[in-house]
Image (cartoon, helix red, strand yellow):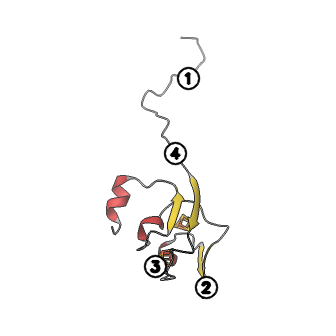
Amino acid sequence: MERGLPRPNVRARVRPRVLTMVRVDPDVCVLCGLCVGVCPPDAMELTPVKLVVLSNCTECGWCVPYCPVGAISGGRPVSGRLRRARPS
Ligand code: SF4
Ligand code: SF4
């Protein structure tokens, strides 16, 4: 090994990270508001006619499994541990 170079961290792994934009299907959303209350950065706004994902959405994916009708898609995949901690 060349001198002066740091040793590689053999435990470090590049974690697969598929991150897609969070989308709400307006044809499926029943405007229940459940997702609004669980969004950590308060990035969802419920209007009388539609649910709006605001620009401060971090695409964390936290809201996705809370939707009772599966209207939300995208975001960062949530780990199994976090998924189990949330309602099915
Ligand atoms: S993906 Fe995260 S930040 Fe974006 S709306 Fe859902 S809970 Fe909020
Ligand atoms: S939880 Fe689902 S159905 Fe309820 S407001 Fe959010 S996107 Fe719409």
Sort mark 1 into few (<14), some (14-19) or many (20+) by Cα contacts within 10 Å: few
Q: Earlier in the sequence, mark 2 or mark 3?
A: 3
Q: Amino acid at mark 3?
A: Leu
Q: Earlier in the sequence, mark 1 or mark 3?
A: 1
- Tell me: is circle 3 under 8 Å from ligand 2: yes
Q: Which residue is mark 2?
A: 49
Q: Which residue is mark 4?
A: 17
| Picture coordinates of residue 88, whole percent (x, y) | 33, 67
| Picture coordinates of residue 72, whole percent (x, y) | 51, 67
Q: Amino acid at mark 1?
A: Pro
| Label 4 residue SS | loop
Specify the label residue 34 is tagged with.
3
Figure check: 83 above or below 5 = below
Task: Depth check: give the residue in front, 69 or 78.
Answer: 69
Q: Earlier in the sequence, mark 2 or mark 4?
A: 4
| Picture coordinates of residue 2, whole percent (x, y) | 58, 11
